[in-house]
Amino acid sequence: MNVADSERVSSALEHLGYEFSPRIEDADVIVLNTCVVRQSAEDKAYGRLSSLLPVKRANPNVVINLMGCLVGVKNNQPLRDRFPYVDVFSPPSDPLPLVEYLLQRDAHTAEQAETARRFAVMDGDLMLPHSNLTNHVAGWIPVVYGCSHACTYCIIPYRRGVEKSRPPEEIYAEARSLAAQGVKEITLLGQIVDRYGKDQSDYPSLAGLLRELHKIDGIERLRFLTSHPNWITDELLDCVAELPKVMPHMEIPNQAGDDEVLAAMRRGYTADQYRQLVVKVRQRIPGVSIATDIIVGFPGETDSQFQNTYDLLAELKLDVVHLARYSPRTGTVSERNMVDNVPSAEKWRRFRAIEALQESVAGEIHATYQGKTVEVLFEDKAKKRWRGRTPTNKLVFVETDENLLGQLRPVRITWTGPWSMLGELSG
């Protein structure tokens, strides 16, 4: 979500005549786009913001813009008081405050102002930043803003606001724009992306959205994240199974494998219901890869409850596990009403136990690719190797002198590890 937001603000600034600066000391405008989903992310944002004070002192004319979840959608006066050297505070997904500030401060033509405002508003117009035009293979389109589910540990509803679906016409226009600029893969984004259209009776479902996007020439792959177990419908599974451009990969957060912990998290399902869903997804979409999220050390989580989570992951053998140690987020239900009573050392022990388990599971899954030929979309080059992904979102590296950027090529897998694979071009 923040990548998509940052691209939009970069595009708007370019239409005001700005260019990307590789050195922060040379910049006229600095945008710090923040995430606070975890305490470590918020701490990092504060640290980065504090490091900008010397830059501001050295160049009082530099414009500093704080953007994203740290600002939020409600009262940000405490931030303004704490960081008086910040010139502009922008809510998540809203570059317009910065654009308006610059338009008022500096002289710009009417055409520049109109264009910058248009690209700052999420209305379907999107021109990728110039620095991305020659190497942008994958694009991201937010389709649902905010979240109204309010899991007890989650800060997102308080920082990004209530759930709101974007008009489908805007999404289609943005996808066509990205395709025209050479983007091959589009990922639809939402805190609960499956709930797209639930707040608007005349909007299509996520499946309906994907079916229309599937018709756009130039787009080779479609993905979506993040799903919620309660909102994955048969219609959506049919869509993934039937449409060649919709990739067989799903992000289905579990968060815990113990029913009492799940209830305390207010997730709305049991461990067995999650288990049954995984079976159903695999039956309907053969060869699908599934990623999940897990939080260890939730308030009150006992050793046996953690073991239930561990055992469920060992049983299901999911492709990817995004791990987090619980950290209280100010204002959430768990922070107000629960005691963060799992010691840090124990959180780390549980984290590393699942990390080791998943390394073994992922290694086993990747080993099944050995010697097989898979289609890879190449996104960029890392040192001497081209980097791309399979339909199931597996990371593959290929060493070649060819320019593979943006190409879909068959690759024979020659080596597999738990986190990536190596291959050679096949034909």
Image (spheres, rainbow, N blue to C red):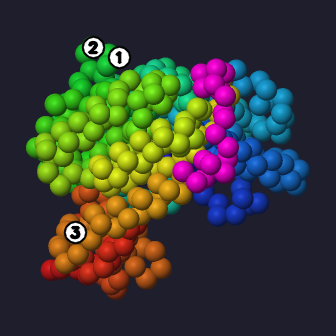
Q: CA distance from mark 3 to mark 1?
A: 42 Å
Give the residues in magenta: 333-350
Q: With respect to residue 2, does 410 lie above or below?
A: below
What kind of element bears circle 3?
loop
Q: Nearer the viewer, mark 3 or mark 1?
A: 3
In this rendered view, identify the residue nearer to me: 385 or 274. Answer: 274
Q: Which residue is mark 3?
A: 368
Answer whether residue 405 is magenta in the image: no
Left or right: where 230 falls relative to 324:
left
Residue 191 percent across, percent down from the top left: 43, 33
Q: Residue at x 30, y 22 (%)?
A: 197
Can residue 180 be seen from the camera position used here? no
Residue on which disc 2 sits: 201
| Circle 1: residue type | Asp
Q: Residue at x 63, y 25 (%)?
A: 338
Q: CA distance from mark 1 to mark 2?
A: 7 Å
Point out which mark residue 199 bears.
Answer: 1
> Viewed as shown, does residue 275 lie left or right of 418?
left
For marks 2 and 3, the one nearer the N-term is: 2
CA distance for labels 2 and 3: 44 Å
The three-letter amino acid code for the residue at tag 2 is Ser
Q: Residue 146 location in percent, x, y?
A: 48, 27
Residues under numbered marks 3 and 1 in contact, where contact means CB atoms less than 8 Å apart: no
Is 47 positioned to the left or the right of 133 in the image?
A: right
